[in-house]
Image (cartoon, grey):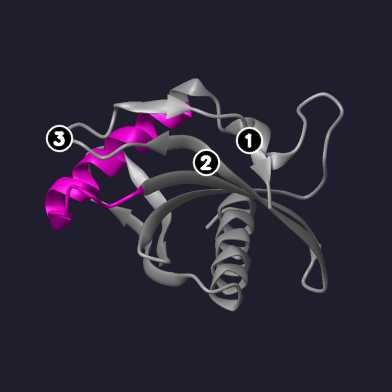
Amino acid sequence: MTETWLLGQTGEELAANYLSKHGYQILHHNWNLHKGCELDLVARKDGELHFFEVKTRRKVSQIYGGPESAVNAEKQRHIQAAISYYISYYKFEPDTTLHLDVISVVYRNESDYDIKIYEDVYFFEFSRSPYKGRRRGWRYM
């Protein structure tokens, strides 16, 4: 296991703990159907489903930005495909509200880290196709 992989796992564990403390019920961690798409965290809160992409870095770079900057349009397309598989696999009700959120973790050590949640990076109005949605700006929680 590489240092990068371990850093990512640490960030996902910190994010899951943070979400649990803030009222989210974690449904899945690293969910995938081996189709090239993975969902880092799937959680439910107030009857709505949240799909979290977790990005972790050791520091914020002036060149590359914070961890959240790694969730570009291509990454969002992969996540949307994974969400499509997920909702098909678990057969969710048509009135289920879906959210794609990003969690940014800057991890310096086990007692020194920052977590930010960017909500509704992509907001889905559920239909047969989760690709129908409206793009929103990122909101910091």
Asked whether disc 2 touches disc 3, contact meaning CB atoms under 8 Å apart, the reply is no
Is disc 1 placed on a helix, strand or loop?
loop
Residue 120: which disc? 2
> What span is colored magenta in the figure?
75-97
Image position, residue 111 (x, y; %): 82, 74
Q: Residues within 10 Å of mark 1 (few under 14, many from 20)?
A: some
Along the viewing direction, whichever of 89 and 56 lies nearer the viewer: 89
Callout 3, which amino acid? Arg
Which residue is drawn at the image coordinates 60% and 72% (left, top)? 22
Taking the magenta stretch, the answer to whether it contains residue 39 is no
Q: For the residue labelled by badge 2, is the local secondary structure a helix, a strand or a loop?
A: strand
| Amino acid of disc 1 | Trp
- The prevailing secondary structure element of the residues shown in magenta is helix
Compared with 123, 102 (above or below) is below
Residue at 75% in and 38% down: 66
Write down the residue under mark 3.
128
**Mark toward the start of the polypeptide (1 vs 2):** 2
**Residue assigned mark 1:** 138
- Lower position in the chain sequence, tag 1 or tag 3: 3
Whether residue 118 sits left or right of residue 84 in the image: it is: right
| Residue at x 29%, y 28% (from the top left corner) | 131
Tell me the amino acid under the disc marked 2: Asp
The answer to whether the residues at label 1 and label 2 have Cβ atoms under 8 Å apart is yes
- Of residues 123 and 17, the one nearer the viewer is 123
Mark pair 2, 3: CA separation = 20 Å
Q: Is residue 92 left or right of residue 23?
A: left
Q: Nearer the viewer, residue 127 or 72?
A: 127
Closer to the camera, 27 or 62? Answer: 27
Label drawn at residue 64: none
Cα distance between the residues tagged 1 and 3: 25 Å
Say if the magenta span includes residue 92. Answer: yes
